[in-house]
Amino acid sequence: MKSCIPQYLLLGFALAFGLGGARAQDPPKVSIKSVKARPTRTLDGPTMFHEYCAACHGDQAQGNGPAAEALKKAPADLTQIARKNGGKFPKTQVMRVIEGADVVAAHGSRPMPVWGNIFRSLENQSVATLRVNMLADYIETLQAK
Ligand code: HEC
């Protein structure tokens, strides 16, 4: 502990000296840095699925992602949706589930995040709807025959 204090002081001194020296020699320059534009968050269905959904539903959407164990309610196997619905993929209904449109706050929370709110907070309603649409389309391609 004893050696700590002198070291701090020395560092502080060197820093002040360095700044003072620089200021005296060079007039402040305005430098223009080129900053790369950050890539927009993708709207690609498979990429969004892996980013937002696979932790619970699994990479293959079969309900066995790494976070599944921690949930009270098992994440659904998303490859069985059409099968459970007489062979037809109920896209509108799936979109409603993803959005959380039918979640009634007063009835408590569901284990799955309300993606409609999350996506709306990223951009706006129309992009949020587009995301949900793209996700539902992707899930449709994963349906077990
Ligand atoms: C924190 C874990 C978790 C994440 C992340 C998650 N889900 Fe879910 N999901 C669940 C659980 C649990 C259920 C099942 C049951 C329920 O809520 O009634 C479910 C159910 C579903 C269902 C209904 C399936 C059916 O058979 O009707 C769909 C569709 C779905 N999720 C899509 C998604 C999509 C798309 C994403 C990513 C944008 C996602 N989920 C992210 C946990 C999660």
Image: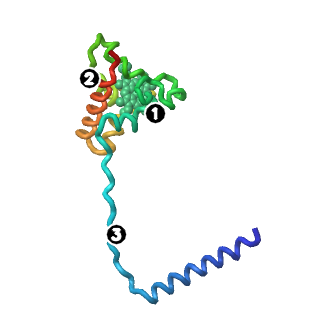
Q: Residues within 10 Å of mark 3 (few under 14, many from 20)?
A: few
- The yes-or-no answer for disc 1 within 8 Å of ligand 1 is yes
Q: What is the x, y in percent for residue 79?
A: 37, 21
How many marks overall? 3
Q: Residues within 10 Å of mark 1 (few under 14, many from 20)?
A: some
Q: Earlier in the sequence, mark 1 or mark 2?
A: 1
Please state which amino acid type lies under the numbered disc 1.
Answer: Ala
Q: Earlier in the sequence, mark 2 or mark 3?
A: 3
> Of circles 2 and 3, which is in front?
3
Q: Earlier in the sequence, mark 3 or mark 1?
A: 3
Q: Residue at x 59, y 80 (%)?
A: 14
Q: Residues within 10 Å of mark 2 (few under 14, many from 20)?
A: some
Q: Residue furthest bottom?
A: 24
Disc 1 target residue: 55
Q: Image quadrant of ligand 1?
A: top left
Please state which amino acid type lies under the numbered disc 2.
Answer: Lys
Q: Residue at x 70, y 76 (%)?
A: 6
Where does the C terminus fall, quadrant-wise?
top left
Disc 2 target residue: 91
Examine the image and state in which quarter residue 7 appears. Answer: bottom right
Q: Nearer the viewer, residue 113 or 33?
A: 33
Q: Which mark is residue 33?
A: 3
